[in-house]
Image (tube, rainbow, N blue to C red):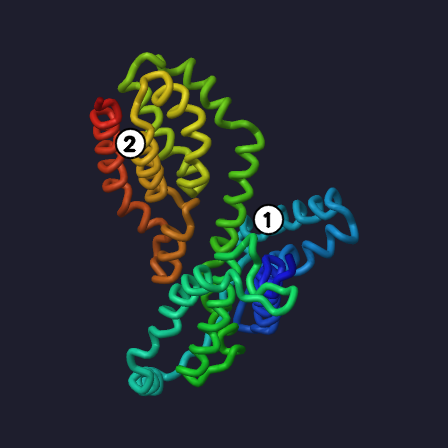
Amino acid sequence: MNSIFNIHFIFYVIGTILLLVALMTWRDESNPKRGATGLFWFLFSVSFLFGDLMVAQLGKSLAYRINGVIVLLLALIAGFNFLGMGAHRFLPDAEFQEKLKKIGMKIFLPALAIPVLTVLLTLFGKTICFGDWYLLDQSNLTLASLILACIGALGFSCLVTRGTPLQAVRESRRLIDALGWALVLPQLLAMLGGVFVAAHTGQSIQNLMSLVVNPESRIGVVIAYCVGMAIMTMIMGNGFAAFPIMTAGIALPFLIIGQHANPAVVVAIGMFSGYCGTLMTPMAANYNIVPAALLELKDKYLVIKTQIPTALMVLACNIVLMYFLAFLK
C-alpha cells in the first residue's frame, strides 16, 4: 500500500540531516579534524540516502558489499580517534537568560508534543488516507508516527523560540559532535543481533551449557541464565538483543522444560538480569556513554563505574528471586 510517510521517507530525513552535518563540519575551521569528521558523517549518511538506489541499480550483493566497506571505514575513523569537535557559538549569558525568561515553561512544550503526537497518530492515524495513498506507513505505523511527530514538534519549537530549521540543524551538529561515534552504535548493535540470530548462537550456547553446568542442578542453571543474560547484554549492548539468544539456549531447554519452572517468572527476571548488564557496559551507549559526553565528564566511563556496585547487587537479588519464585507450585 502506498503511503506518504513511509520507512524510506524516514531514511531520507535522517540521511539529509547527517549530510547537512557533514557539510557544516567541513566548513567549520575551528574543528582541527574537520576533514575526517565530515567524512565520517558523510559516509554514515550514504546508506540512508542512497541505500535503496544502490540496491536497485547495483543489486543486493554489490550494494551490501559497499555498505560493508562503509562500516569498516567508519570503524577505522573512529578507532584511530580521527573525530574532532568544533567550537560552537552560543548566545551571551545575559542575552540567553533574557530569551529564556521570555519563553518560560513553553520551552518544554515541543519535547512533550513528540510522545503525545506519536500516540495520537498511532491510535487514530492508521485510517487517514488521500485517495489511494495512506498518510502513514501501515507496516511501520509507530515509526512513521514518530517521524511525523518530530517534524510537527520542530515546527512548533520554531514557533515558540522564533528559531529556524537551520538553527535546529546547527544544534543537531553540536549534539552529534558531543556524542561522536557513539551515535552510530545502536544501529551497529542491531546488525550484530541479526548476525547472532543467523549464526544460531542460542544452539551453541545450549551445547556449551551442557558441558559446563549440570542441567540437573537447579541453582547452577539459574546462575548460568542470570549471569549469562548480564554478560551477553554487556557484549551486545541491549537486553532485548540478548534475551532471545539466552532464553532459547538456557532458559527454555534447562529451566522451563527441564526443571518445569514458571515461564513468566523466568523470562521477567531474566530480562531484568540483562538490564544489570546494561549498567556495566560502554556498548549501551545511549545509557552510559551519551550522558557522560553530554555532561562533559572528564572520565567517560564514570557513569559505568558508579553503576557497577548497584548492578551486581541487583543481579545477585535476581538470582535469589528466580531460584525461590520460579519453582513455586
- Identity of the residue drawn at 36% across and 57% down: 291
Judging depth in this view, the residue of 96 and 237 nearest the camera is 237
Up the image or down, 25 lies above or below 227; here it is below
Quarter of the image where one finds residue 132: bottom right
Q: Which labelled disc corresponds to residue 265? A: 2
Crowd rating for badge 2 (residues with CA inside 10 Å; few <14, some 14–19, many 20+): some
N-terminal of the pair, mark 2 or mark 1, is 1
- 77 sits to left or right of 226: right
Quarter of the image where one finds residue 105: bottom left
Q: Which labelled disc corresponds to residue 76? A: 1
Res 36 visible: no
Mark 1, secondary structure of its residue: helix
**Disc 2 or disc 1, which is closer to the eye?**
2
Crowd rating for badge 1 (residues with CA inside 10 Å; few <14, some 14–19, many 20+): few
In the rendered image, the residue lying farthest to the right is 57
The percent coordinates of residue 222 (x first, y second) are 30, 24
Mark 2, secondary structure of its residue: helix
Q: Are marks 2 and 1 in contact (CB under 8 Å)?
A: no
- Identity of the residue drawn at 41% across and 62% down: 119
- Identity of the residue drawn at 40% across and 82% down: 160
Q: What type is the residue that disc 2 sits on?
A: Val
Quadrant for the N terminus, please: bottom right
Quarter of the image where one finds residue 102: bottom left
Quadrant for the C terminus, please: top left
The percent coordinates of residue 260 (x first, y second) are 32, 19
